[in-house]
Image (cartoon, helix red, strand yellow):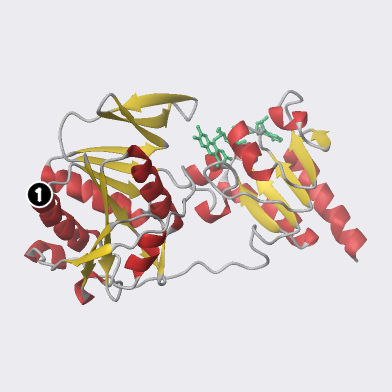
Amino acid sequence: MTILVFLEHHEGELQKDSLSVLGKALQLGGDVDALIAGSGVEGLAVQAGKYGAKKVYVADDPALEKPLPQPRVDVLAKLIPEQGIDTVLFAATVLTADVAAGLAARLDAGLNWDLVDLADQDGKLVGKRPALGDTVYVDVGWTGEPRLALFRTGAFDPVESPAEPEVQKIETQLEDFSTQAKMIEQAHEESEGPSIEDADVIVAGGRGLGGPENFALVEDLAKALGGAVAATRAVVDAGWYPYSTQVGQTGKTVTPRLYIAVGISGAIQHKVGMQGSNVIVAINKDPNAPIFEYADLGVVGDLHEIVPKLTELVRQRAA
Ligand SMILES: Cc1cc2nc3c(=O)[nH]c(=O)nc-3n(C[C@H](O)[C@H](O)[C@H](O)COP(=O)(O)OP(=O)(O)OC[C@H]3O[C@@H](n4cnc5c(N)ncnc54)[C@H](O)[C@@H]3O)c2cc1C
């Protein structure tokens, strides 16, 4: 097995999830190489070495400066047959999802996405991915090579295992059609108030809010308490709130003094990200919601009635 891990980077750092996928690949055994593509990225090979990469291909070219997928597909589509690579692993991001899909189309290869694990079962690679609204896990495989796989954010933790990587620079040869897309603008999300990692108080909203417009209820309460807003996966997957606010197994782990869960059922995958909070308050209309099993204080009722009153009370007290 010859595995290649595509290492994504941001602002001079290799992305944590890519390094986690590298760690997973190393556990599987066989030859594991890494690829870093970008402009001014040669120095990043040392970081990859810290996480066990023994051979790092570096495509360092101004043509790869912008986070556009097709030039990266060009690099991979040339490297894979040249080096006899049979498996390519990506940590899922907006860019890598495009790269992996483009590569699958270019090489007529099979792509499994949203994986949370990968194992070698009697010489056969088998991926694990959640299905049916994350209620079950299914095993997935490939019928041909190269096998392409995208892993869910936070599926593993990176493991440091220092190695002195052999760095092999590779030339970038772009297809004409790959230079047609131009990046017009790149913007960073600006947020007010503390981040959820730093906040003493977090007010988190779940699907019980009923729609993105009702996040205003959660935002108002967070503002009154000087806290930050978080969300469940159900909500960020529905596009109601940014992914950066997701708490849980595949989101962030938070440990505020106070965590107020609004319209959140309290699934185990959410619990693991917030159970270290000092005080957990839950507002839910279902008295049997699992969150009440581990909340310190529970309010059974309609959040649309309770939250505005609570916000008003906090504002009065603060005044
Ligand atoms: C591998 C894997 C990883 C996952 N990772 C995460 C993760 O990182 N974070 C995460 O959050 N989830 C994660 N999940 C998903 C998780 O299993 C749940 O599906 C999700 O947390 C549910 O989100 P929710 O509580 O917002 O929605 P729901 O489970 O739909 O709960 C909504 C709640 O709102 C209540 N409600 C409805 N209307 C009202 C109202 N008017 N007033 C008061 N209460 C109301 C309901 O009673 C219900 O309890 C993961 C799942 C898998 C399989």
Count residues near mark 1 (Cα–Cα under 10 Å), then give few for <14, some for 14-19, many for 20+: few
Helix, strand or loop at label 1? It is helix
| Amino acid marked by disc 1 | Pro
At x 36%, y 61%, the residue is: 49
Quarter of the figure that contains the C terminus: bottom right
Return the residue at label 1.
81
Q: Position of residue 210 (x, y in %)?
A: 60, 39
Instruction: Find residue 28 and report its image quarter.
Output: top left
Q: Nearer the viewer, residue 313 or 122?
A: 122
Instruction: Find residue 140 and report its image quarter.
Output: top left
Q: Nearer the viewer, residue 72 or 146?
A: 146
Quarter of the figure that contains the N terminus: top left
**CB at disc 1 and ligand 1 closer than 8 Å:** no
Instruction: Find residue 58 and report its image quarter.
Output: bottom left
Q: Position of residue 36 (x, y in %)?
A: 28, 62
Residue 69 visible, this orientation: yes
Q: Position of residue 82 (x, y in %)?
A: 9, 53
Q: Position of residue 287 (x, y in %)?
A: 77, 25
At x 63%, y 44%, the residue is: 273
The correct choice, above or below, for 266 with respect to 213 in the image is: above
Q: Would residue 303 be found to the left or right of residue 31 on screen?
A: right
Q: Would residue 239 be found to the left or right of residue 39 on screen?
A: right
Residue 238 visible, this orientation: no
Q: Would residue 276 be found to the left or right of residue 318 on screen?
A: left
Q: Quadrant of ligand 1?
A: top right
Q: Would residue 64 be found to the left or right of residue 93 on screen?
A: left
At x 12%, y 45%, the residue is: 107
How many numbered discs, if any?
1
Q: Nearer the viewer, residue 180 or 128?
A: 128
